[in-house]
Image (cartoon, rainbow, N blue to C red):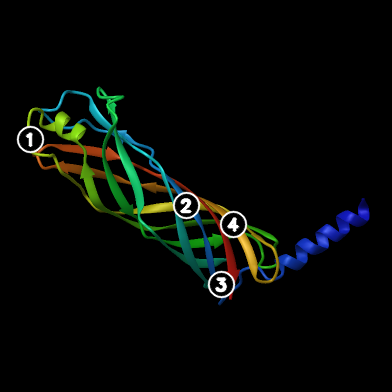
Amino acid sequence: MIKVLGVAAGLAFASGAYAQSAGQITAKVGFNRLMPKVESGDISAPALPGTKADVGNDMQPVLILSYSLTDNISVEGALGTPYKHSIYGAGAIQGTGKLGEVEALPPTAFVQYRFGAPTSAFRPFIGFGPTYAYFMKERGSSKMTAITNPGSDVPTTFKIDNKLTYSAQVGVAMNFDERWFADATVIKTRLRTDVHFSTGQTQFMKLDPVAIVLAVGYKF
């Protein structure tokens, strides 16, 4: 048992000897599950009081590039495909079903601090940086029209305000060998925005999404 533990410790040290260090570029690919934590305001009159909304989750592939400024400080940026979210009735219209859809593209950049030495096999890290939440392809359903403009044959459309905000992250990286590694990250974004309907009504939305990213990377 002592010999086995000794070999395991030696392998962990050997793989950690090539961890991210100053001047190094890394690229990783994985999947990001984006989960809005919604607190919805009411759609303004003439909608019924308590007419709220909820937003579904989505998961998309992501490409993440990083550059190490020092052994402990790095910058990171993420690229990916738009997240497709369904919008559902909530509050007084809970159970109404799907009201519409929207696609969101939230490019984010982080300044990170990695704990421990570059020779560590496992390196926890934290990060903080700006996020630009860009909304597109908003599409309402007949149920949205019935709620916002009952009796009308004109479909209700809507637009969600884009927002510049910020995100924080916490994660841990693990090295397999001198080039390959994997990491897991949890990201929390502060995001509040307004919805504008073609009927002239508005709605405040607190989204504050949480993202969980699992990725495999390569060190150049």
Q: Position of residue 65 (x, y in %)?
A: 48, 68
Q: Is residue 71 visible?
A: no
| 67 vs 197, nearest the viewer | 197
Mark closer to the chain start, 1 or 3: 3
Q: Position of residue 204 (x, y in %)?
A: 22, 38
Mark 2, Cα crowd under 10 Å, few <14 / some 14-19 / many 20+, is many
Whole-number angstrom distance, CA of label 1 to CA of label 3: 61 Å
Mark 3, Cα crowd under 10 Å, few <14 / some 14-19 / many 20+, is some
Q: Which residue is mark 1?
A: 153
Q: Position of residue 118 (x, y in %)?
A: 66, 68
191 horizontally vs 16: left or right: left
Mark closer to the chain start, 1 or 4: 1
Q: Position of residue 38 (x, y in %)?
A: 34, 36
Q: Are marks 3 and 2 in contact (CB under 8 Å)?
A: no
55 horizontally vs 150: left or right: right
Instruction: Please state which amino acid type lies under the numbered disc 4.
Output: Asp
Instruction: Please state which amino acid type lies under the numbered disc 3.
Output: Thr
Which residue shows up at 81% across the image and 59% down it? 9
Instruction: Please state which amino acid type lies under the numbered disc 2.
Output: Asn
Helix, strand or loop for disc 4: strand
Q: Nearer the viewer, mark 1 or mark 3?
A: 1
Q: Which residue is mark 3?
A: 70
Helix, strand or loop for disc 2: strand
Question: Disc number at residue 183?
Answer: 4
Q: Which residue is mark 2?
A: 32
Q: Is residue 185 visible?
A: yes
Instruction: Please state which amino acid type lies under the numbered disc 1.
Output: Asp
Whole-number angstrom distance, CA of label 1 to CA of label 4: 51 Å
